[in-house]
Amino acid sequence: MNIKYQFYGFLVFVSIISLVSCQSVGGNKTGSEYMPDMAHSVAYEANTYGYYYNNRWGSEDDLHKMVQPRNPVTGTIARGYAGEKTDNMHGRGISYKMNGSVPYYYANSEEDRARAMVEIIKNPFPISVKSLEKGKLLYNIQCGICHGEKGDGAGYLVRDDGGKYPVQPANFMTDDLINSSNGRYYHAIIYGKNLMGGYSDKLSFEERWNVIQYIRSLQAASKKLEYGEKANTFNTTDTPYSLIVSAKNAELASTASQNKEASVQPKTDEHINIQH
């Protein structure tokens, strides 16, 4: 009799264990897991809030604080935004992408504005027909409404038919702005100036320089000077594309000439065997 009851008791025990062990998955419940560590990481995962009872990083509140997003390190370039490289911008080798972003090492302060004006001199992109056309299009979209299509500060918003603007936009045709460095324009595009907001989120790295080139072309025209793909008599900081092509062609011609001279040089025997 005792053996019979023991057997029945064993069957009941096994049945209960089976029922408890076979829980279905649903909602936030994972069901029963034989080795939960194989499915749930107990390690700290950045930007992922998934508290688990085997977590080793303190309480649920501690984990919540740990997984909050952090500010990126200064100078960080977002994934996929590093492309070609230019060494022409204030002495630094900077990676950029056509429609991406690059680090900017100047703060939004008058001190750094003055520093940018001194240090950012050379336009890293050569003057070309394409860059000027693109610069004109972007200027008329983003800048012309205030600074005017001619760059004279008489945009639609400050004309009689456009209403009054509280502050007079800069007139790029003044000698002060004509003689200013490229850094003055680039810093203003990044952070803005006075009531003008920044355009770093509206214009990419290359587009900012396209706009600056177009402003320079308007200034050059006002002084009856050349500023284009073939020649630049306006300043010494922006390079016409034709000069780059000429330099490359000269380099290729020099290399070809050297290779030709090397191929026609007579061969001489280093060792002469004399037989007696």
Image (cartoon, helix red, strand yellow):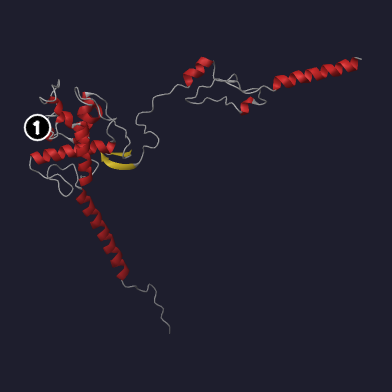
Badge count: 1
Q: Please provide percent x and percent y for residue 130.
A: 23, 45
Instruction: Identify the residue at image location x=26%, y=64%.
Output: 257
Is residue 2 something that shows in the picture? yes
Location of residue 145 (image quadrant):
top left
Q: Which residue is mark 1?
A: 174
Question: Where, quadrant-wise, is the N terminus in this rendering?
Answer: top right
Q: Quadrant of the C terminus?
A: bottom left
52 lies left or right of 47: right
> Does residue 118 appear in the picture of this structure?
no
- Disc 1 is placed on an element classified as loop
> Measured from the top left, where is residue 91 in percent x and y?
26, 39
Give the camera-side residue of 39 and 102: 39
Q: Which residue is painted at 15% across and 40% down in the image?
A: 217
* Residue 12 image point, x, y percent: 80, 17
Question: Which of the 4 image quarters holds residue 168?
Answer: top left
